[in-house]
Image (cartoon, rainbow, N blue to C red):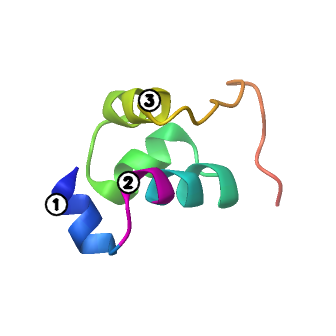
Amino acid sequence: MQRLEAVHGKPMDRILWELYIRDHLTVREVGDRLGITAGAVSEWLRRFDIEARPTSSRRVA
């Protein structure tokens, strides 16, 4: 996590919020962007109390 925070210049909760909530990326897409597994992304979303979207939700274009 510290490596990602250093690379992106912001705390991990902010990185996740921007990618997952603001940019509407899927968990897998966030993982791909960060070079980590979707499972790690899911765990960090839980850790930072970022509410997961339903798996059936679609991105807004």
Q: Are marks 2 and 3 in contact (CB under 8 Å)?
A: no
Indicate the quadrant where residue 43 lies: top left
Q: Position of residue 12 (x, y in %)?
A: 37, 54
Alpha carbons under labels 2 and 3: distance apart: 13 Å
Closer-to-camera residue (23/14)? 14
The amino acid at mark 1 is Arg
The amino acid at mark 2 is Met
* Magenta highlight range: 10-14
Q: Name the N-terminal-most of marks 3 and 1.
A: 1
Q: Is residue 12 left or right of residue 4?
A: right
Q: Is residue 30 left or right of residue 7?
A: right
Q: Specify the farthest residue to the left.
A: 3
Q: Which secondary structure dominates the residues rendered in magenta?
A: helix
Of labels 3 and 1, the one closer to you: 1
Mark 3 nearby-residue class (10 Å; few <14, some 14–19, many ≥20): some
Q: Is residue 30 left or right of residue 25?
A: left
Q: Residue at x 30, y 37 (%)?
A: 37
Q: Position of residue 59 (x, y in %)?
A: 76, 48
Q: Residue at x 32, y 33 (%)?
A: 40
Q: Which mark is residue 12?
A: 2
The amino acid at mark 3 is Ser
Alpha carbons under labels 1 and 2: distance apart: 10 Å
Under circle 2, the secondary element is helix
Q: Which residue position holds label 3?
A: 42
Indicate the quadrant where residue 49 lies: top right
Closer-to-camera residue (57/11)? 11
Q: Position of residue 1 (x, y in %)?
A: 22, 50
Q: Which residue position holds label 1?
A: 3
